[in-house]
Image (cartoon, rainbow, N blue to C red):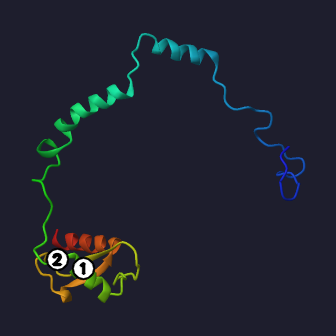
Amino acid sequence: MRLCRNTGRTWFKKGYTPYNKGKKGYKRPAWVGEKISKAKKGKKFYSPSQYVKGQEATKGAFKEGRLNPCWNGGGRLKYAEGFTLKLRQRIKTRDNYTCQDCRHKNNLVIHHKEFQKNNHHPDKLITLCSSCHRKRHIKKEDNNG
């Protein structure tokens, strides 16, 4: 019977027997082990290094670049010149390093209010947390779609 280190009492009420008292875990029947060993006989064991080599062979063919079914022409949407780290820091400082929607202070990004990536006027920029930023873009997609 287990005793509490601090009080010296048992963990269970008087007369209560734990459901696993006297049991030592699950032991599968012998016939299951025999069945598994028969199934494995004659089969090759592949080392991890062989698996990695095989994986690398298919990697270029299916998962990267133009051959990937999700290929969209490469690259990402670019911002016009002028959207610099200095400008983003200035906007965050102006907004007191807080999200202007929910007032959180973590994972801050700069958002273009009018969704025009070439307009970097400070009046058109706002500090948002990544969660609120995502919500704004989802709303925009819903309104356009």
Q: Residue at x 16, y 77 (%)?
A: 83
Q: Residue at x 46, y 15 (%)?
A: 40
Q: Nearer the viewer, residue 130 or 94?
A: 94
Residue 134, picture quadrant: bottom left
Please, what secondary structure does the residue beneath circle 1 have? helix
Q: Residue 44 in the image: x percent, y percent?
A: 39, 16
Kindly check if marks 2 and 1 are in contact, taking CB atoms under 8 A apart as contact.
yes
The answer to whether 12 is drawn above or below residue 139 in the figure is above
CA separation in Å, label 2 and label 1? 7 Å
The N terminus lies in quadrant? top right
The answer to whether 31 is drawn above or below residue 24 in the figure is above
Q: Please tell me the numbered disc located at residue 88.
A: 1
Q: Please tell me the numbered disc located at residue 120.
A: none
Report the side of 18 relative to 118 (left or right): right
The C terminus lies in quadrant? bottom left
Q: Amino acid at mark 2?
A: Phe
Q: Please tell me the numbered disc located at residue 83.
A: 2
Residue 137, picture quadrant: bottom left
Q: Residue 13 in the image: x percent, y percent?
A: 86, 52
Q: Residue 115 in the image: x percent, y percent?
A: 16, 77
Q: Residues within 10 Å of mark 2 (few under 14, many from 20)?
A: some
Q: Residue 15 in the image: x percent, y percent?
A: 89, 47
The answer to whether 96 is drawn above or below residue 21 in the figure is below
Q: Nearer the viewer, residue 47 or 10?
A: 47
* Total numbered badges shown on the rendered structure: 2
The answer to whether 36 is drawn above or below residue 61 in the figure is above
Q: Nearer the viewer, residue 123 or 84?
A: 84
Q: Earlier in the sequence, mark 2 or mark 1?
A: 2
Q: Residue at x 88, y 54 (%)?
A: 9
Q: Residue furthest front?
A: 86
